[in-house]
Amino acid sequence: MYNQQLKAFVCVADCGSFNKAAERLYLSPPSVMKQINALEKHLELKLFDRTNQGIRLTAAGQVIYRHAKFLFDYSAKAIEEARLQAAAVETTFCIGSSLLNPCKPFMDLWYQVNQEFPGYKLHIVPFEDDHRGILNEIGALGEKYDFLVGACDSVEWMNLCSFYQLGTYSHCCAVSREHPLAEKTSLTIEDLYGQTIMMVKRGDSKSVDGIREELEKHPEIRIEDIPQFYDIEVFNRCAQTQNVMLTLECWKDVHPSLVTIPVEWNHPIPYGLLYAKNASEDILRFLSLISSPLQVDN
């Protein structure tokens, strides 16, 4: 982490001799003198007085020597700290967490098996729900994150990661609190007549495509395509309009201005742990130890 010429300089000062320093450094005396000369030239300072009785540090040399010793000590501490940090990273699971993809399901599982990972720590890494950037977050599995938690049957997501299913969520409908449907405790397809339903476009989610096919049998229901992946702006749009939004039971508390209502249909979506396709042995061992996946509290 420092100039090797500086190491030679300190060694010469400690030994009081080029020859003795050369022995300690396993170099030839001319090689050591060459390094000292190069250092003096680089600094434009005379560091040693050379006499028939030997060598001694000049006033400038004493200053450089004092600071060089400090630099060596500081470098050693920095290297040790870096090694400790590297060891900590190797024994840390990094879990991504966002408003729509909270890490609680992972935490519930972790405390079932954490005794099998002595010394391991968890590090929660927050990220923003952004429909334009979510694929980058999924692609960061194995580097930025070890695990993400999500409800997913997205073809695009699955092209980027592996998936361990924990259970399923139900698709529901969300409306603003002022919407005529807000007082209902459950909905039928007929309740949606005359409404505009916000949902992602066809082709990426098998479960959402199934709902679309069912709704398309009822011309009284209009469908509005929204961004491929949800973020808070989709929830804001629902709150600001009289439209109905296709949502999940686990998102019922995401937006305080919306009411989430169950629907009498059968279109579950899997949820679980997302992890890198080239997962490490520790990640695979964690997954193998999960014996009874937990259902997320709703």
Image (cartoon, rainbow, N blue to C red):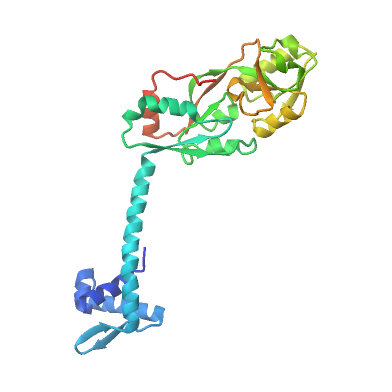
Q: Quadrant of residue 150?
A: top right
Depth order, front residue of 54/71: 71
Q: Quadrant of residue 80?
A: bottom left
Q: Quadrant of residue 157?
A: top right
- The residue located at (34%, 61%) in the rendering is 75
* Place of residue 122 in the rendered image (x, y in percent of width and height, measured from the top left): 41, 36
Depth order, front residue of 283/121: 121
Q: Is residue 146 left or right of residue 100?
A: left
* Place of residue 143 in the rendered image (x, y in percent of width and height, measured from the top left): 47, 41
Q: Can residue 5 be seen here?
A: no
Decide: is 7 above or below 288.
below
Considering every residue shown, the one lying at the far bottom of the view is 52
Q: Is residue 105 left or right of residue 229?
A: left
Depth order, front residue of 134/298: 298
The quadrant the N terminus occupies is: bottom left
- The residue located at (30%, 75%) in the rendering is 9
* Place of residue 61 in the rendered image (x, y in percent of width and height, measured from the top left): 32, 80
Decide: is 110 above or below 260.
below
- The residue located at (64%, 30%) in the rendering is 230
Decide: is 186 above or below 44.
above
- The residue located at (20%, 70%) in the rendering is 24
Q: Can residue 195 be seen here?
A: yes
The quadrant the C terminus occupies is: top right
* Place of residue 159 in the rendered image (x, y in percent of width and height, measured from the top left): 55, 30
